[in-house]
Image (tube, rainbow, N blue to C red):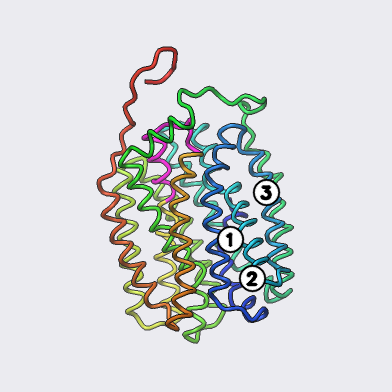
């Protein structure tokens, strides 16, 4: 999680070096990252299915290889099509196999319900620490070796996920057969998509994706457009990662004690307030760092309560797959946030409209999460099964 999430949170640092070197528009770069997020969401569903069936280790192993290939392709792509295929498709597939849907499936199957939200908070904090650790590292690599060689070195680093994933092997997946389930995949999907609370969680997660990926990819360029140095942008993203370590962990702990829907509503509303204050205040390094710290606390804090709620409602047998579908909604939002950022900047010369959209969506997401019902879904007893 630290490597996978850390690498992807630094992609905004490559926007200006790559577009200037290749003479591309910002929309070209943004579209490739948008494709990456969409592919991540789509293939995350199937990565979750494979992890539910064969265990997480094999899926992570394949994902790490794809990550290395995608970063190498990102370094040497000479056309917009090749750039989208490597940066968008390959890295998107890699992220699907090395992040939340797969990791949270392991947690759901191996951690008791009493500690599940906390454990998911720890895992999300690991991903956030990756942002704090890797974004300055990526900035250092770019400054020391150039943007191309920096991507090559990151590709080699991603192969380290293979030995790290060895610790996520599960005894139940040692053979060809998966653990017994009381629902088929189709039954689990039909049940989830007919359940209003699942739909509301997906809608809220769309907003999460829109906000964080727009800020993560476009804020470095936004700051440079307003005369701030690349170091300010790098430090701001690192601060988001550092403070999100505390935010995601706190969200996981609070999820054991409070209604998770109220935690989610607070996070989304607080994001809108933070963005509004950021746009109103004079833009200085101090205001950027303050905004980054506040947004960091709220950044991926939605992940533990959202996934813990899915596990609480539907159980853990198909958790990786259902988490993959919820995350797919997140990634549709990510696609829209990053692509609209590039498109509207090229069209209007400013990011202002996208900032306003992010504020409005945050308020809407806060209201959407309030009606969510967190209680376990009632299922009719079926003779010969172990669950009712």
The label nearer to you, 1 versus 2, is 2
What residue is shown at x 43% (from left), y 32% (from top)? 188
Which residue appears farthest toward the top when viewing the image? 383
Quadrant (top left, top right, bottom left, bottom right) of the C terminus = top left
Give the distance between the C-alpha atoms of the residues marked 1 and 2, in whole angstroms.
Answer: 19 Å
Badge 3 is on which residue? 161
Q: Which mark is residue 8?
A: 1
Q: SS class of the residue under badge 1?
A: helix
Magenta span includes 302: no
Q: SS class of the residue under badge 3?
A: helix
The quarter of the picture where residue 7 lies is: bottom right
On the image, the x and y values in percent for residue 204 come to 35, 53
What residue is shown at x 29% (from left), y 59% (from top)? 364
Badge 2 is on which residue? 80
In the image, which residues are magenta? 303-320
97 vs 341: above or below: above
Name which of mark 3 and mark 1 comes first in the sequence. 1
On the image, the x and y values in percent for residue 93 come to 61, 51
């Amino acid at each position: 999680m630290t490597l996978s999430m850390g690498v992807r949170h630094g992609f905004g640092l490559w926007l200006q070096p790559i577009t200037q070197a290749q003479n591309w528009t910002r929309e070209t770069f943004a579209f490739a990252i948008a494709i990456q997020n969409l592919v991540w969401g789509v293939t995350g569903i199937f990565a979750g299915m494979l992890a539910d069936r064969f265990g997480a280790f094999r899926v992570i192993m394949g994902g790490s290889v794809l990550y290395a290939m995608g970063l190498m392709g990102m370094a040497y792509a000479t056309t917009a099509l090749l750039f989208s295929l490597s940066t968008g498709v390959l890295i998107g597939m890699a992220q699907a196999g090395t992040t939340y849907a797969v990791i949270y499936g392991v947690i759901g199957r191996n951690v008791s319900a009493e500690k599940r939200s906390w454990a998911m908070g720890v895992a999300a904090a690991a991903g956030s620490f990756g942002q704090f650790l890797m974004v300055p590292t990526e900035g250092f690599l770019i400054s020391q070796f150039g943007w191309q060689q920096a991507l090559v070195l990151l590709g080699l680093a991603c192969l380290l996920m293979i030995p790290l994933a060895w610790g996520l092997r599960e005894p139940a997946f040692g053979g060809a057969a998966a653990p017994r389930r009381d629902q088929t995949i189709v039954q689990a999907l039909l049940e989830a998509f007919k359940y209003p609370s699942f739909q509301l969680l997906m809608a809220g997660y769309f907003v999460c994706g829109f906000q964080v990926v727009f800020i993560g990819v476009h804020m470095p360029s936004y700051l440079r457009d307003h005369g701030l140095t690349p170091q300010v942008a790098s430090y701001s993203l690192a601060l988001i990662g550092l403070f999100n370590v505390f935010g995601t962990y706190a969200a996981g702990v609070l999820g054991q004690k409070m209604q998770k829907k109220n935690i989610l509503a607070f996070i989304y509303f607080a994001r809108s307030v933070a963005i509004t204050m950021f746009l109103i205040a004079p833009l200085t390094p101090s205001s950027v760092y303050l905004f980054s710290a506040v947004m960091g606390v709220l950044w991926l804090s939605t992940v533990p309560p959202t996934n813990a709620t899915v596990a609480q409602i539907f159980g853990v047998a198909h958790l990786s797959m259902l988490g993959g579908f919820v995350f797919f909604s997140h990634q549709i939002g990510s696609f829209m946030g990053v692509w609209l950022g590039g498109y509207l900047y090229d069209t209007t010369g400013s990011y202002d409209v996208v900032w306003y959209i992010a504020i409005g969506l945050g308020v809407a997401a806060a209201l959407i999460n309030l009606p969510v019902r967190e209680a376990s879904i009632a299922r009719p007893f079926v003779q010969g099964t172990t669950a009712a």
